[in-house]
Amino acid sequence: MENKVELPPHLRWPRQNYCGCNCNQNPAPAERRHGLAPGTLEILPELALNFIYGFIPVPPVSVVAPLACAAARRPKAGDTADRISSLTDDILRRIVSRLPAKDGARTAALSSRWTGVWCSAPLVLVDAHFLPLRGEEGVRPPRRGALSRAVTNAFSAALAAHPGPFSFVSLTCAFLQAAAADRAVLARWFTLLATKGVKELVFVNRPWPVPGLRLPAALFSCASLRRLWLGAWVFPDTTKLPRGVSFPNLQELALGAIVMEDRDFEFLLAACPVLEVLSVIGSLERSHGRLASHSLKLAQFCMCMFQELTVVSTPCLERLFIWRCCWTQRRSPKVKIGHVPKLNMLGYLEPGVQILEIGNTVIKSGTSPSPRTTVPSVKILALHLHFNIRNEVKMLPSFLRCFPNAETLCIESKETLEPTGALNKKFWKETAPIECIQSHLKMLVLREFQGEQSELDFLMFVAENARVLEKMVLVMKQGYAAEREVAARFKALDSARWASGDSKLKALVARYPEFGGTLLATKGVEELVFVNRPWPVRGLRLPTALFSCPSLRRLWLGAWMFPDTATLPRGSALPNLQELVLACVGMEDRDLDFVLAASPVLETLTIVADQQELRARLASHSLRCAHLCFSCLEEVAAVDTPILERLVIQRCWTGCRIGRKLGARVKIGNAPKLSTLGYLEPGVHVLEIGNTVIKPGTKVSPNTTVPSVRMLALQLHFKVRNEVKMLPSFLRCFPNVETLCVQSEVTHEPSGNLNSKFWKETGPIESVQSHLKTVVVREFQGEQSELDFLMYIAENARELKDLVLILKLGRLCLFYIIYGNSSLRFVCLISPGKLDWQQIISFSALNVHTLRKKLVKTLER
């Protein structure tokens, strides 16, 4: 019988140590094992990085591994024999190879014999082992600095001192930038790794792929590599590589948050003639993934952005796993299956969302099965499905017919926020026979079962047609239907005419431990951080005992379902709460209203990654700062906030339920002390002041302005006509703004620029003319539309003192202050590279010739 390759444990998802099993590997969290520092990033990069670091293998040696000293007997009195010296060199080399690099090097101080042992032992080199110990593991440096440089220098010294070979090398604590010194370090490292025979390499940059800093081409000189994990890098430009470069021995490859082109991915597969395991996590470029490999057996894609995933020719491929991939919104994603004669496991497909193409035939509703439209080798099939979306359920039979020999079917039932109409029993009764269900299906697992009638109809179809079914397992979601109703439906299903004989039904309901809210309340907790893992569990709410903690002053909640405040007793309150943070918390509008009313001294409110399409109505006589970011919000309204000073709205949209990002409504009512407001998105957000919706040409009046705002932040696509057209109207609503920050967004689908004539015909804007002192443009791209706006500012802002441009040219490394006249300071943050000098701003108040001259001179130097 042919040996099948198993997916390595560190590449399985969910990870075993996340599932609660007794794992014998290093129990320290990935953040400490690998020096992860995602906390300094925004929420989405942090999520991706945590995911990537979860896949990195645990080093084979540890600095905290317990020694079995207790098992060793104490020597008898007078017994001074040196038993270690009697061991052979081969045994000593094995001992040293199981020590961290710094401990192994220390053995050389014992004697000249030990020096030879260390130099001839295969070395495990992990940069995190050079960190200072505090508790279980080394605490990684949070940012680039003296500690990170010391670790990098120690790693470089060890790499240079040992002659090799290196059985395992892990570098995850470095902060490398697009600078000549760092590029030289990279080149030196890979030259040494290639010449000294590295076999397993983990190489992750921090905190994110740096534009302009590519992995060196010397990576392809590491011919001895068998396993390779790369994270947070820009891949080498494979068109510039010499012919014949390859990884002749590479068997396992993992790419996490790698920026690469389609051609690079294809080149990489072609350059790995014995590659068996491929894992791609968190790709940062929309791509067409084409799998063509005669050795590949396992392929896994998680949290990637694909326009199309094509399995061209993979004669040995056994498992293809696609999980939580973000497809482009311009068209439906396509999964194309070509030559895969040994494909045994496939998932997760999404009927009605993905376009499935087998051979050259696109599978549609009603497609007749034939040898050209089926993959008979698949035995395990996994699907994602919204049972209350008509088109998805309608495509389900067609997808199932494509895999006639499937024996195990796993379906994850997705929650449907906006149903499009369920298909009733009649649909399934009229459905033609499906071969895999009738003749081969032995096990059906329905995860996240919600008790909906549409789910029961499908299960009834399977029960009445699956003749060889051995087990039907339902993993229920809590909180979706009344227990009596679910029990009645189970009874109907259990008593159905099962084609396989008696009922095979098994239902599982997850149980969770109770929250010790009563104990916390009685023991006077003042600051509480309470985060569930890994995500809010539908049906598992925080208990109402949370509101029995009157001593709380600061509260952080993460990944929870909020208590149903409609069931709370009257008078429930958090009388001393001053700061509240809600991250990934599921809650209704009424719950947020209740919390604000129940927190009479609340000063700071932060909502991060809410997914419930909230209407955030801020009504509080104590609130001073409100921060809402990365959330699905229909409306943000400062209804009655007499002392609110700062309102920050960042990356918030509505329309998330239908897969589109639309502008939320931002309404400002009673906020007399509001001084900082952002990030508004002209043309995207609907701005309402008082009861007036701001439109192009809205006349300025006391009812349409917020005179208290001194600092205003905007996000703008300068190449989207409607957004730029709304900009003057937004600026007129804040007549006393002194600091304006504009983040220029990249425009993938321009809708036409407004030329300089638009700004010349724009009437006076009071804030620009009379109050504006500082303008900051972030992610400046040098587009003509940006220059037209800046020219308008320069020609009209009489009080302007500082103009700051942060160019979108990679990592910032040069800082200039150039005085054009006595009243205006121009600050330009740039990075070295190929600059288009014609796009440097031609302000009359600036000496552009001097600017250009100084920049060119510095870059040449």
Image (cartoon, rainbow, N blue to C red):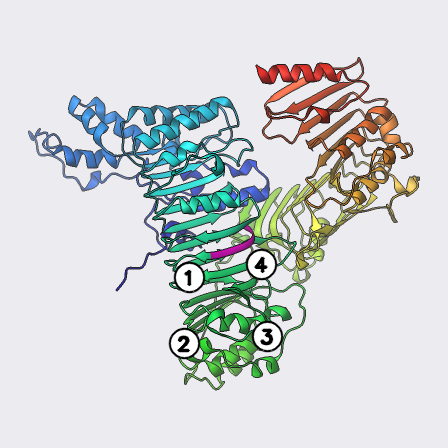
| 302 or 554: nearer the viewer | 302
- Characterize the local packing of mark 3: few (<14), some (14-19) or many (20 or more) Cα atoms within 10 angstroms: many
| 714 or 375: nearer the viewer | 375
Q: Which residue is mark 3?
A: 454
In the rendered image, residue 475, in percent from the top left (x then y), is placed at 48, 67
| 331 or 155: nearer the viewer | 331
Q: Which residue is mark 1?
A: 340
Gap in Å between the C-alphas at discs 2 and 4? 40 Å
Instruction: Provide the residue span drawn in magenta.
Output: 305-311
- Characterize the local packing of mark 1: few (<14), some (14-19) or many (20 or more) Cα atoms within 10 angstroms: many
Q: Are marks 2 and 1 in contact (CB under 8 Å)?
A: no
Q: Are marks 4 and 3 in contact (CB under 8 Å)?
A: no
Give amino acid for label 3.
Answer: Ser
Identify the image quadrant of residue 44.
top right
Give amino acid for label 1.
Answer: Val
Q: Earlier in the sequence, mark 1 or mark 3?
A: 1
